[in-house]
Amino acid sequence: MRSPTRQTLATTCKDNVMAQGDPIIQAKDIIIKFSLRGRTLTAIRGASLELYEGETLAIVGESGSGKSVLTKSFIGMLDQNGWIDSGTVSFEGRDLARLRSERDWLAIRGKKISMVFQDPMTALNPLKTIGSQIREVFELHHGMSGKTADHAVIEMLERVGIDNPHERHRQYPHEFSGGMRQRVVIAIAVACKPRVLICDEPTTALDVTIQAQILALIKALQRDLGFTTVYITHDLGVVANVADRVAVMYAGQIVETGTAEEVFYDSRHPYTWALLSSLPQQGIKGQLLYSISGTPPNLFNTITGDAFAPRNPKALRIDFVRQPPMFEISPTHRAATWLLDSRAPAIDPPPAILGMRAKLGGAKLGGGVL
Amino acid sequence: MLLYTLKRLAQSIVTLFIVVTAVFMLMRLLPIEGYFGDGYDKLSASQREAVLHKMGMLDPWYVQMGRFYGGLLHGDLGVSSIYRKDVPVLEVIGPRVPYSMRFGIAATALALVAGLGMGVSMAKHKGGILDKVWTGYVVLVNAVPLAVYLLFIQLYGTSFFKLPLLFDKYRPESWILPAVSMSLGGIAGYAMWMRRYMVDELNKDYIKLARAKGLSQSAIMVRHVMRNAYVPMAQYLPASILMTISGSIYIESLYSIPGMGGLLVDVIQRQDNPMVQALVLIFSSVGIIGLFLGDLLMALFDPRIKLSKSEASR
Amino acid sequence: MMRDRLLAGAMSPDAIRCAVDSGSGAEDELSLFEPAEFDPNAGERGGYSNYSYWRSTFRVFLKNRVAFGFLVLLVALLAFTFIQPMLPGQRNPTKIHIDPATGMQFRNVPPGKEFWFGTNTIGQDLWSRIWSGTRTSLEIGLLVGIAEMLIGISFGAMWGYVRRLDAVVTEIYNVINNIPTTIILMLLAYIMRPSFKTMVIAMCATGWLGLARFVRNQIVIIRDREYNLASRCLGTPTRRIIMKNLLPYLVSVIMLQTALSIPGTIGWEVFLTYIGLGLPVSIPSLGNLVNEGRQIMMSPELRYQLVFPTIVLSLITISFYVLGNAFSDASDPRNHV
């Protein structure tokens, strides 16, 4: 039985996703390489991604998939030994991949595109008050000084939920807890109302109760200040909580993108299947938990075919031969797997995935299934 | 803060006490000829013993130490035996201190300004030509013994720049060569320290955040890294300044500067034991006091230290 | 045929690749869409584990042209220093040369064919004096360096590893550290009277403490690092932890200190000689030669007596310094990128 190549999921897409215009960031076929110990490592092997205004996009993948590297290239903070080999990143009419001089980047970083980092404990300068660190952004991008700047700082602190800002802005980072410090980092990032906020695993270093607070905070700020959020995470729970759209990365490529519902309940790429199957919630009592066998490929070597093939028990022969192109499942859902080719046999996803699809309900899947 | 100060003060006093005692013990090993000057050969054995007895040298060591400390508390460090016969040690040393200090402070100031600037330049241009040039300077100053390159400075300084060979307090240009010579090692030291510190700091996370904020590299260097550098530097600054009292032994000797260091060379060559003892004492003590002040200063600048225990040793 | 073999599932992925590339046609391509055999081991072949610490260290070190150049220079210099007496036509360094024609000493003869580096103020051949002096200074430097290393490492290791010793010894160290080295050296030389043995003993006495402190610091830092705690939790015997975790790092760091101690020792030797507490004039050493040269440096035509010893001395010390630093930089894993 052959699987249909162009399934239409007419009604599954969220409204705000459907109402897209042009994306504010459009990355096309990015290739990023690093020079390491005399050899070249290709960290990003042709990734394409769009970011639409006002949405929350989550980039998911395991360690080493290239999620951080890709977004670092958006603000020009690749490590010294890395470079963008080819590809374009369009933002506000410019190609960010071509920007070379620091001065060009200075106009973007912190002002148009901001980043929140993973570890709040080391992200702040220990010898400066947090007030002065927030103030710096205002001074830099808005030219504020004196009382105006102070007011802006205090207002920002209130926004992110730090109580008693009139006194606390004079305190040092070591006087704040981890969650509080992350709030300050967020305050710094959104102070100048950027268009895009990139959050690189913002809650990984925090405990679970604080995680929820921080995610809620970012959501609220997004609503109030009107920016677009990109989450980089390996935690699918976070994704389920906040994301409108999801992009799944593996071995330096984006293997599947779609709305959150599409990716969770109607995933098509074997890697996404494997990821979702490994959620502990999928475990059945009395049976072994599922885990993906093997390790990600060595990116020093050239990879032929589908990078995930060696770890995929259901791989086709062609997966070892030629890299699968992106197949469109719906206007919002794409996956790069040969299983979507018209010539491919019908392969059932693992039972866990079938279970999720069933949970979603046939109704949501719309017409044209079989 | 007060508690920390008192704790450090107590530590310093204890260390000082131990050092002074150690010096005292060490001094007992000095050859006894040093107490007689020219008269040594002329006296018979029993006469020598009488002199030593009169000086109290033959008393049991704890008595001698008690007397020593007693004198110390009165500001009495003994009397010179050869250099300036029978003149109290402090009187001999006194007029020499200002010379050493003036040179020392000038050299330290020069070293700070030039050294830190060099270090920043090296960090900024890391791997580039400037970095290599300055590194070459540091290598020369560190690898070639002080004793050697100073000679050449004296040599070429006097022949090319027509600067005076020896120090003369009536000729201001005679200050230049010694002061510059004294600062060279300091420049290299501060430069390497600053470079290492900046490179380490520039790799830290909070710098990444500052970059993501949109700060330019030079703004980051000035506002974050260099500003943070004051803290660890403050620890060593007072010690450096105070140690200038000891003067640079070698340089003072080369240029005949009437300072403390030159004095030490003279009294060792002339074997004037009380002078040697007093000078060694002073040299050792200033270091301890300087370190204490340095710790205080660092605590003042670094908000984290007041709350935590300081490390055991540097 | 090809197709039959593909259908039978008997071909490996690599073989399939070859078959496709050779252009097997649309029909065969269709058969590519059959499920492939799953080899669980194929997935494990990832991994970046070809990193070898020492190989990377030497690679980085050799890439440093300057350091390599100095290495060659130093080896050549050292070799020559010890071979020199065995070459033909070399003179005795302490012999005073007398002109057979006039019966006068060959004083202050400028460098030329007869005396390659000239002679000094009393008619001794400077060329042989310099190499003899270098030998002496190097002997002191090496003896002191090795002694410092042995004493310093053993003491430092104990100091760092045995926790109970730490507090006491640290306090003692703080005390001793406050007495300037210059003073101690001068005092020791003063008390023991200048000689070869005195020099060696005095410099060892002041030098080993620095290395011990260094070793102790490294051990204290590493001892409590999480990877060592993890090793202990896994039941790794202490000896193995020391050999595999601590020692490799220490070796490179210790070699650096020892390499740097040699220029230091030579420097102190020059200083002490200047003060008058150095080696007696009968034993030529770089310190002696420099000081002799210093006394007449103001007259340009005699300056060569200062310049030659200084050049040799500087080449040696700079080489050791550069090599020590280059090796230390190369052995820092952060530079293995």
Image: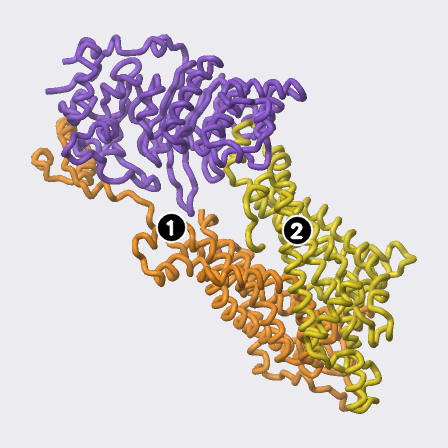
Chain colours: A purple, B yellow, C orange
Residue at image location 39% in from the left, 24% down from the top:
A231
Seen in the image, is C321 located left or right of residue A8? right
3D distance between C-alphas at marks 2 and 1: 33 Å
Q: Position of residue A37 (x, y in %)?
A: 42, 47
Give the vertical position of C225 relative to C154 (above or below). Answer: above
Say the numbered circle drawn on residue C306. Answer: none
- Give coordinates of residue B35: x percent, y percent: 79, 79
| Badge 1 amino acid | Tyr
Residue pointed to by mark 2: B236
* Residue at image point 24% right, 11% down: A9
The location of residue C121, given as percent across then percent down, is 78, 80
Q: Tell me the chain of label 2.
A: B
Q: Which residue is mark 1?
A: C227
Q: Are marks 2 and 1 on the same chain?
A: no
In the figure, residue C98 lies in which quadrant?
bottom right
Element marked by disc 1:
helix
What is the secondary structure assignment of the residue under circle 2? helix
Quarter that holds the C terminus of chain A:
top left
Determine if residue C113 is in view.
no
Categorize mark 1 by other alpha carbons within 10 Å: few (<14), some (14-19), many (20+).
Answer: few
The amino acid beneath tag 2 is Tyr
